[in-house]
Image (cartoon, helix red, strand yellow):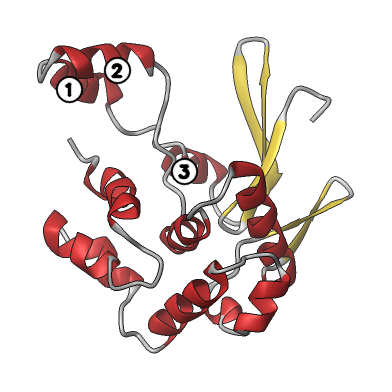
Amino acid sequence: MKTGSYTGVIKNAVLNVKKLDGKVIFEGVFEGDIEAIVKDYFDLNRDYEKIKEKLSKIDDNLKQSTQYGKGIRILKQDLWETIISFIISANNNIPRIKGILERISKRYGQKIEYKGKDYYTFPEIQELEKASVEDLRELGLGFRDKRVHDTTKMFVTQEITLKELKNEQNTEILRDKLMTLPGVGRKSCRLYNVIFTCKI
């Protein structure tokens, strides 16, 4: 935004972030405790210094990487949104991915108004279930339309659930479960593993 702040959707909240007089200020439209939402999403309770210390002792490459990536944090994005986003990212570029996700959210998500502008949440499983392959194709998903559609159906029928993915502690088993989803391959699983196993 021209105000020097950033506004985005986090789960069912619209959050505005800005830096003022050395402080980071959050405001927006949300349900629940904004401090808890922010700390969880931005992973503020994790000891990154401890993680970097352990990684730096493995080899020089990781040591250099931790120094180069200083200040970077892994956002704790909603698992369902992450899965669909990764499927859409296949052979795609960031502007197109962003556009597709915005169109899906506008069509099937919930509208939230903030300071005179409309924002849309990422649709829940039951909301995205309403989309046919043809509907998704109209939103520009290309060959990913059937993959997103079929993945959604797997969660609707509980062939696989978010709960079992969240609770799985074995990386190999988790990878195998993820790869049963249409459009999820080893490249996507490596990215998922970063999210699921970053518990050093």
Which quarter of the image is occupied by the C terminus? top left
* Residue 48 percent across, percent down from the top left: 29, 25
Residue under pointer 1: 55
Of 66 and 136, which appears nearest the observer?
A: 136
Q: Amino acid at mark 2?
A: Ser
Question: On the rendered structure, is 198 left or right of 39?
Answer: left
- The answer to whether 181 is drawn above or below residue 82 in the figure is below
What residue is drawn where x is 69% and y is 53%?
99
Sequence-wise, which precedes: disc 2 or disc 1? 1
Query: Tag 3 or tag 1, which sits nearer the N-term?
Result: 3
Residue 44 visible? The answer is: yes
The location of residue 36, given as percent across then percent down, is 47, 44
- Is residue 30 visible in the rendered image? The answer is no
Dot 3 or dot 2: first in sequence order is 3
Observer-side mark, 3 or 2, equals: 2
Q: Looking at the figure, which quarter contains the N terminus?
A: top right
Please give the name of the residue rendered at 66% of the width and 73% of the height, measured from the top-left corner: 137
**Mark 2 sits on what residue?**
65
Q: Nearer the viewer, residue 62 or 43?
A: 62
Q: Mark 1 or mark 3: which is in front? A: 1
Q: Secondary structure at mark 2?
A: helix
